[in-house]
Image: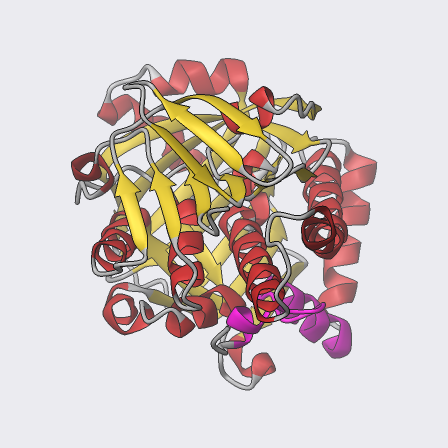
Amino acid sequence: MSNRVIIVGGGLNGAALALALASTGQPSLLVDALPPETRADPAFDGRAYALALSSQRMLAALGLWRELASKAERIAHVKVADGRPNSGVCGPHLHFNADELDGEGAGFMLEDRHLRPALLAAIAGQKLITHLAPAKVVTQNSGPNTASITLDDGRKFEGALLVGCDGRASAVAARAGIARQGHDYGQIALVCALTHEKPHNGTAYQLFLPAGPLAILPLKGNRCSIVWSESASRATAIAALDDAAYMAALRPVFGNFLGEISLCGARFSYPLSLTLATELTRPRLALVGDAAHGIHPLAGQGLNLGLRDVASLAEVISDATRRGEDIGGALVLARYARWRRSDIAANSIVTDGVNHLFSNDNPILRAGRSLGLGVVNAWPGLRRYLMAEAAGLHGTLPRLMQGQAL
């Protein structure tokens, strides 16, 4: 029986899992439908990640952070407010300060165009990782002792475990008969980078507007990434505008608290939905990242949640190997599912609930929200607890997320 792990999906989570396994001496086959040059494209595609402190520690433990540190912007402050168009942060709001976590901060902002090439370079330097790209899986099977896949060119591969890291529309999950549940938010996220006149001072803003949240996330220099959630109909109309008209629509929403703003690079849009796999595992199969859960981006926790999957599965596999267990066996996979289930459920419930609570203009709810934010802001203990939660420092953390080797 091959002890190789077959990873389908060469995005951030799939690549990170292959590297985490390689750090323990575990071989893997990484199958990616996209060619490496597409993954390594240095152009900004609109995506930037709010890496929780625990995720940064994981990247450091995998040897990636030394290269990435100079390209990341430390999040020194987080301000959360029930906003109004053209107002920025005003009235009662929640303010998190890095000093409340011993000066470490809540995490870092890192652009996708920097993280992807770093992962690819690390994979290329690992003899334990066989990277097939572009390659597409057309069939998969789980037997009593092995998992197997067949590619579109006819090649077949076997391993002890098959891991689906292939996104929200996971074909691995679908072929395994794993159902999904959730709903469409009726919102589309408009994503772009902006340059601005005034410095952001490492401050991330989460403004809850009637149509949906607006995240303003600090990047290196006087730049920020925005995730502007609007109703699907209005967002579709805005996305169709030229750059000048797009900025004319954005400025009244953004406000002028960072001075004059201008577009920096291309614009993108992503439909928003909640989608959860009903099972995290099947015989000789596990799901990781968006293949297991896709949540609303308002808290910026999507990648962090996926990396916690990666760190947990890698640790479960590593510990099982040391004990001489079958890494694709039912008992081993049950440990992974138990470890991740409550964290996934909690994040899904919180992001879903907060989006519904804040994405409206009900005056009674607005008054209650403002009062609640003001109360939490005045309660240092609760404020520190919430900041540590956002930094990914609560719960039973995998060793990689504590900055430790497996």
Tell me residue 335's x, y (percent): 72, 56
Tell me residue 340's x, y (percent): 69, 52
396 in the magenta segment: yes
Instruction: In the rendered view, tell whether residue 283 sits above or below residue 394.
Output: above
Name, please, the residue furthest toward the front.
1
Name the dominant secondary structure of the magenta segment: helix
| Residue 86 located left or right of residue 381 | left
Taking the image as drawn, is residue 260 in sight? no
Q: Quadrant of residue 240?
A: top left
The residue lying at 55 percent from left, 65 percent from top is 318
Tell me residue 231's x, y (percent): 56, 21
The residue lying at 27 percent from left, 74 percent from top is 66
Colouring of the image? secondary structure
The residue lying at 46 percent from left, 47 percent from top is 2
| Residue 144 located left or right of residue 74 | right
Name, please, the residue furthest toward the bottom.
102
34 in the magenta segment: no
Q: Quadrant of residue 237?
A: top left
| Residue 117 located left or right of residue 205 | left
Return the residue nearer the eye: 348 or 135: 135
User: What are the residue bounds of the magenta stretch?
Assistant: 379-402
Q: Quadrant of residue 201?
A: bottom left
Tell me residue 56's x, y (percent): 44, 68
Return the residue nearer the eye: 308 or 266: 308
Instruction: In the rendered view, tell whether residue 198 sits above or below residue 290.
Output: below
Return the residue nearer the eye: 294 or 85: 294
Return the residue nearer the eye: 180 or 391: 180
Taking the image as drawn, is residue 320 in sight? yes
